[in-house]
Image (cartoon, rainbow, N blue to C red):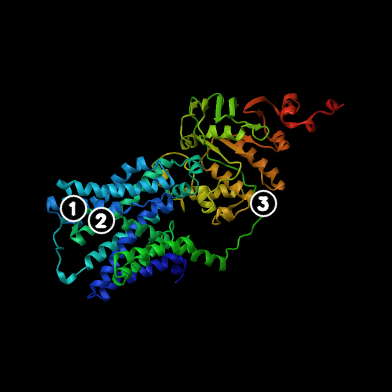
Amino acid sequence: MSLIRRIPRQHLIAGIALLVLVLYPVVNPWQPYPQGVLLLMFLLAIQATGWNIISGFAGYISLGHSMFLGLGSYTAAIIALHTGVNPLWVAPIGGVTAVVIAMAFGYIVLRTRGHAFVIITIALLLSAQIVATNWKSLTNGSDGITLELPFWSADFQNIPFYYAFLLLLVLSVLFSAWIARTKFGTGLIAIREDEGKAASIGVNTTIFKIIAYGASSFFIGVAGGVYAYYQTFLNPVGAFAILGSVLIVLSALVGGRGTLYGPVLGAFIVGLINEGATVYGGSSQARVLILGLILVAVVLFLPAGLLPTIEKAWRKRHPVKVEFTNQVGALSHNTAVVRERVPEPASTGPLLEVRGATKRFGGLTAVDGADLTVERGSITALIGPNGSGKTTLFNLITGTMAADAGTITFDGKRIEKLPPWSRGHLGLGRTFQVTRLFKDMTVLQNVVAPQPDGKLRTMLADAVSGSEAARARELLDIVGLGSFEQQKAGALSYGQQKLVELAQVLMLEPQLILLDEPAGGVNPSLLGRLTEVIRELNRSGITFLIVEHNIPLVLDLCDPVHVFARGACIASGPPGQIRNDPVVLDAYLGDDWRPQDAHA
């Protein structure tokens, strides 16, 4: 009994529902119509679960996902027609075909975002229908392909198909659950929340999206092969119907996209309504109208979907008790130990060199031929008035923006043409002036999400348990937020989010961390300990480049100090020299920092 209590509630309910579905044909074997309705619900749930990987996890909405069902159907049907092999045995080849097509087109179409991506996916679906219609030598065109009837006795009716689709549904849900547990899954959610930030923490957004697009299509393609045998006839219009894609999207929206069981629940609800509209609606137009009204109702009144809405209501009635520290004492006094990267033999000289960096926005020059050097092992400050180009220079260094001119060398390598994730893999991390955590992810997921390298084994590592999660918890303990690991990041105070972002960057195993106003929004009582943690990390081998307006903090913590004004460096040196430099006083610090004898 205690074992059952340890099973999460949603998994327990799903297990009971699965048991009922498995036993239904055994208990009631002589009802082909309900079995047929249920197996079509299974098919819709398989498609919605696959769609959820690219559109729910990664946030790229596809309105052409039923194309993969048609591709799987035609692959199995064509092979069966020319070889005599039963379509059931070659259905997995339909899944492989779907993956190959998805990744080939994904390499191109996933460069677009938002409405453009949605429109392109619709165009792909319609293009597949046109190709199937006109490639008569392969597909028989509009005449379609007729397959042999199932080889088993008619006494079994639809029961073999029922269990085939149910098995594929279980496998697709397990596959989706496995993805959600990995760093690949947290990377996809990071892309959905903030793609630019995801790239800055080492997530290769291009590769992640292409793999996700392919992964979302496999079980749909396999199901297409089984569906072709179930139908025994397919033609281009039926195989590549846009209404099928609408049903997939509607199912995920009703149940809750981005959740594990939401698309399945939504598919059962939408499938039941669709069947009722077909039987009692009187016409196909009435069915489309009913489905359209459901879509409008979901968008207006249930935008998050059914399961997230229920979960939110449950948490509101049963809040998790967490002791909020209001930032005071939030930083632990654990030793800030980080895993060191193995230095390369040629790693000599400055860690970061910026030469002639320039960035223009129309007629405005934000960074104007800037030079900057950061020595290994230093805590270097970059100060200057607002609008002087400090944050823009950070963006150029980390790849958030492309420089118009100049060179950037990190650890002896030219990086100005590298994408942001490649710079992160080299050991270059940053925090942002305004925190850019993934607000709908938990604190632990935020810290696990970074990818310190581009290796497949890192991508597929378990993000929920194992060494990656243990490492994330260790870093959360260092910044004193270990007890908040299951809280949504958006529920934390601004200062606490700053600390989580620091732990997130440390997950990259960085050589250099760029801190953009780390003291901003942090309780003053924490600044001393924050300074201590930075020094501890620095002693462990991490170099820092800090943009900060808290001048006393800069003078106490940093050496050397570079002063920016009008997009270029106007002074560099140790803190004592900078605080007395007349050029710096005139451009930034002002009369309050002039020596007393200068006022006389």
Question: What quarter of the picture does the C terminus occupy?
Answer: top right
Write down the residue under mark 3.
Answer: 327
Residue type at mark 2? Answer: Gly
Disc 3 crowd rating (10 Å Cα; few below 14, some 14-19, many 20+) is many
User: Residue 432 appears at what percent x and percent y?
Assistant: 58, 41
User: Is residue 96 in sight in this rendering?
Assistant: no
Pick whichever of labels 3 and 1 is earlier in the sequence: 1
Query: In terms of secondary structure, where does tag 1 sit?
Result: helix
Query: In terms of secondary structure, where does tag 3 sit?
Result: loop
Residue type at mark 1? Answer: Ser
Pick whichever of labels 3 and 2 is earlier in the sequence: 2
Residue 509 placement, left or right of 128: right
Residue type at mark 3? Answer: Gln
Write down the residue under mark 1.
Answer: 142
Disc 1 crowd rating (10 Å Cα; few below 14, some 14-19, many 20+) is some
Q: Residue at x 38, y 57 (%)?
A: 249
Between label 3 and label 1, give the one nearer the viewer: 1
Q: Are marks 1 and 2 in contact (CB under 8 Å)?
A: no
What's the CA distance linking mark 3 and mark 1?
68 Å
What's the CA distance linking mark 1 and mark 2?
18 Å
Write down the residue under mark 2.
Answer: 224
User: Residue 322 appears at what percent x and percent y?
Assistant: 61, 60
Pick whichever of labels 1 and 2 is earlier in the sequence: 1
Foreground residue among 262 and 67:
67
